[in-house]
Amino acid sequence: MKLDSNDIKERIKNTLMETLGITFIESDDEASLEAIMPVTQKLTQTMRILHGGATITLAESLAGAGSNTLCASDERCFGMQISASHISSAEVGDTVRAKGTILHKGRSTHVWNVDVFSENTNRLISTIRITNAVVKKVIYIKAHK
C-alpha cells in the first residue's frame, strides 16, 4: 500500500508506535501493508519473549494506518474490535514483520487480517483480525469539542 513515508514518520512521532520502534514499509500491493518492529527487552513479558500486547499493538497500528490511508478526506478510522491468536514466540534480538491485508472495505467498517512473522525463523507468531470503524470527520470533531 502506498504511504507517504515522510508523512507517516511525522505522524507517529511521540506516539506508542515510535516508542515500540515500529517502521512502516511501502509496497506496490494496493490491498496490503507491512511494518516491522524490533523485539527488545522492554517489549517482553515475564518469560522474556515478545509480549502479546506488543504484537497486538503492531497489528492495530498497521490496520489503523492502512484504513486511514484508504479513507476519504472527510473520514477517519478507529479500531473497534481485535481478535488475536498467538501461535509462536519471538525472542529479544529478533524483528517481527506484520503483513496486513484488507478483507472488507465498507462504508462504515474495514476488516483487516494481520499476520506477524519472526524475521529470524520465518515462523508465524500471531494472526490478528481487526475491525475499524469508519467515521465522518465532522462527527468526530463535533464529539470532541
Image: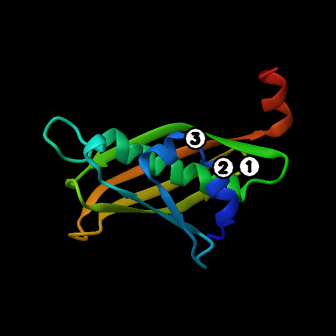
Q: Is residue 38 visible from the viewing direction of this image?
A: yes
Q: Which residue is mark 2?
A: 11
Q: Is residue 122 above or below residue 84?
A: below
Residue 72 or residue 61, whichever sits in front: 61
Provide residue 92's location: percent of width, then percent of height. 22, 53
Q: Residue at x 52, y 48 (%)?
A: 61
- Residue displayed at 30% across by 43% down: 43
The residue positioned 29% from the left and 50% from the top of the image is 40
Circles 1 and 3 in contact, beta carbons < 8 Å: no
Tell me the SS state at disc 3. Answer: loop
Tell which tag, 1 or 3, sits nearer the viewer.
3
The residues tagged by marks 2 and 3 sit, at their Cα atoms, a distance apart of 9 Å
Q: Residues within 10 Å of mark 1 (few under 14, many from 20)?
A: few
Within-10-Å neighbours for mark 3: few <14, some 14–19, many 20+: few
| Residue at the far bottom in the pictured view | 28
Residue 107 got which mark?
1
Q: Which residue is mark 3?
A: 14
Alpha carbon separation for disc pair 2 and 1? 24 Å
Nearest the eye: 43 or 69: 43
Indicate the quadrant where residue 136 lies: top right
Kind of residue sitting beneath label 1: Arg
Q: x, y percentage for residue 123?
A: 23, 66
